[in-house]
Amino acid sequence: MGARRQDAELESLLASEREARARAEAAESALRTIIGAAPLPIVSLDVEGNVTSWNRAAEAIFGWNETDVLGKPSPTIPEDEKPASDAVLRHVLEGETVRGLRRTRRRKDGSSIELSIYTAPQLDAQGQVVGTVILAEDITEAVRAQEERELLLRAEQEARDQAVLAGRRFRFLAEAGSELSSSLDYETTLGSVARLAVPRIADWCSVLVVERDGEARQLATAHVDPAKVQLAEQLAVEYPYDPEGTTGAPAVIRSGAPELIREIPDELLEQVSPDERILGILRDLGLKSSMTVPMVARSRVVGAITFVSAESGHLFGEDDLLLAEELASRAALAVDNARLYREVVELVGQKDEFLAAAAHDLKNPLAIMKTLAQMLSKRVAREETPDVPRLLDVLSRIDVAATRMAGQINELLDIARLQMDRPLDLDRRPADLLPVLAEAVDEYRHLTDRHCICFSSSVQTLPGDWDVVRLERAISNLLSNAVKFSPEGGEILVSINVEEGGSEGWATITIRDRGIGIPGRDLPHVFERFYRGENVTRRIAGTGIGLFGVRQVVEQHGGRVAIESELGAGTHVSVRLPLRPMDEGVVSDGKGYRDEA
Amino acid sequence: MKRDTWDVEPVLVVDDDPDLRLAIQWALEDEGLEVVTAADGREALDVGTRSQPSLVVLDIGLPVLDGYAVAAGLRQTHGYAVPILVVTADGRAAEKAERVEAFDYLHKPFELDDLLSAVRRGLG
């Protein structure tokens, strides 16, 4: 009985064990089925990290079959991800569970895949960790979508930033524009514009203008810190502008092209610094980036604006350069307008002065005529027998004064034509110019006893088609200048020479004085309308039309005028006129002169 | 011949226009005055300070030295003993006359009677 009972117990044990095994097998089969059918890759690794299982979803998603990977480390882990992956494995082997770890893995075809990884330790029946089980969710699509969203968001933010920046730039240009148009005093308005530019566009802004004589002048320097402005101004005084400078404003003014230095290298600071002290100062200022743009109006460079960033650390780019160029073109326009306005005001003033001088000159012959005529009536009234020769003398003087006045009026009409930039209506006839010149010299000899006017001629005649009235006036004008501009008296040499050359000869009339001379900077302008030298403007009367008229008369005769002068040593004017042999007897047809009129 | 006779030093006529200078000279000589002339400011000072003229007919816009300089030089040498009559062609004659402390002024072109009566007044 005891043995049967034992058998029965054994049988029951075996049965329950069979049952348990069957249940376990069923459970394992169910698990394998689940793992096999799972849509997510499920992979298990041993403690070494080698693959112990690789489900169908893993095969489908990664591209490797289970047989390819069993007993080896997972091939999906990119080389650079391995250390991080090993670290996770160690944590999990120590008993930790990891959820939703985002990892990038690669497929067999080399493409990458974004995963959300869940991993937990795998225990044996004794509770010993024997490996890890990894579940991976393919979140590539979600990640891509997220990335795209972020990209869009960033683009939108950037567009908004750009719009804000564009708005700010537009406002700046508008403010600068209204500042520039607020007054014709560009020295002040450009200073305000420089101050508007800091710190909105740059930490430093300086404006340089090129004056009419070609010299550049620092007009304004701006920085938020007045002490730094003072430093810059002091440096500008100590180290004057070098027009030959190879970078910055001098280079831009010479070339007319903008200069953008995105990052200022230390070598550049060394290059532009005349000495160690300046180099030290420039380094201390921490200059980062710079741009210099030319101010161009009517194709002429009228100045340059330099922007420098320092404290802000901003590096200038193409956008900044566009804005700077826009600002510079507005500033150039303002400078040009102001200068044109000043020129017009100056010309109007000169014209008024000229009118006053013309009226003044006409009053003298009138005073002569009136005085003599009234004197004559008095004489006739009181003298019973008028002294006829004296009477005739006075009458001829009245006639001379009237002729002189008519000449002055004709001259005024000529001047009016010159002022309107129209050629003179010359009356050229075959004539000998020599006696005309001799007479003009003679007349001036009588007008001055402080000057010794010497006349010499290498020829006996100067035949040509001449407007003798205009040429006499031109030569008289030059003589009058020689007399006027040598107030200390002295010798005035008038010499006539003839050069034979080509089909026609040339007459050269030179007038040399030892007077006050013409300053070098005035010399190129003396033949301009209304121009008067700086050293005579307030000291010696005149309208300034004289030399312009002389040139016009001479050039309309096909000749040229040249002037040389040395301040304090005197002036030398030479007039060259084309000769025509008298015996040809050609009567002027006025061709080329009258037609223009 | 009806002429005033003046027992005075010569009148100095200063003008850079030779024809006008001569016209004024003749007109004053017709009145029995002795006349000396000068064509520019320096000449005027030379003549006017060498001996004391009884009166000066002075144009202001002169070469070399202007009328102001001439007046200043004359004042320095002769004080107010020499009366100055300003004769000028431009508009600010009164202002110029005041500046040189002239006893009167005339605009060019002037009436001869005005010139003569001003000169008579100046000579007292």
Image (cartoon, grey):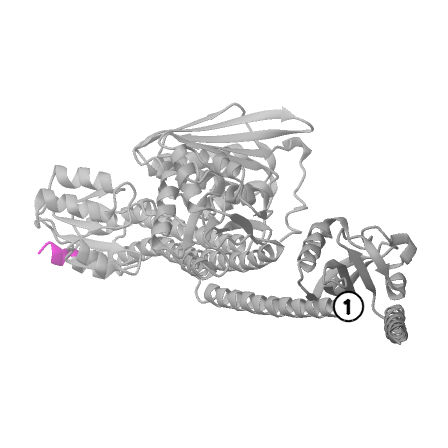
Is A557 a magenta residue?
A: no
- For the question of whether residue B10 can be seen, the reply is no
Determine whether B2 is above or below A428 in the image. Answer: below
Extent of the magenta region:
B119-124
Identity of the residue furthest to the top in this view:
A458
Residue type highlighted by circle 1: Ile
Quarter holding the N terminus of chain A?
A: bottom right
Residue nearest the viewer, comparing A119 with A377: A119
Residue nearest the viewer, comparing A256 with A6: A6
Is B120 a magenta residue?
A: yes
The percent position of residue A512, horizontal first and vertical second, equals 43, 30
Determine whether A449 is above or below A535 in the image. Answer: above
What residue sits 61% from the left and 70% below the top?
Answer: A160
Determine whether A504 is above or below A326 in the image. Answer: above
The percent position of residue B23, horizontal first and vertical second, equals 28, 49
What residue sits 41% from the left and 55% below the top?
Answer: A223
Q: Is residue A560 left or right of residue A179?
A: right
The percent position of residue A162, horizontal first and vertical second, equals 61, 66
Locate residue B101: give its quadrant: bottom left
Which residue is label 1 attached to?
A: A139
Q: Is residue A519 left or right of residue A28?
A: left
What residue sits 8% from the left and 56% below the top?
Answer: B124
Determine whether A231 is above or below B122 in the image. Answer: above
Q: How many marks?
A: 1
- For the question of whether residue A83 can be seen, the reply is yes
- Considering the whole magenta stretch, tell me its main secondary structure: helix
**Chain holding disc 1:** A
Q: Is residue A411 left or right of residue A590?
A: left
Residue nearest the viewer, comparing A167 with A539: A167
Residue nearest the viewer, comparing A550 with A228: A228
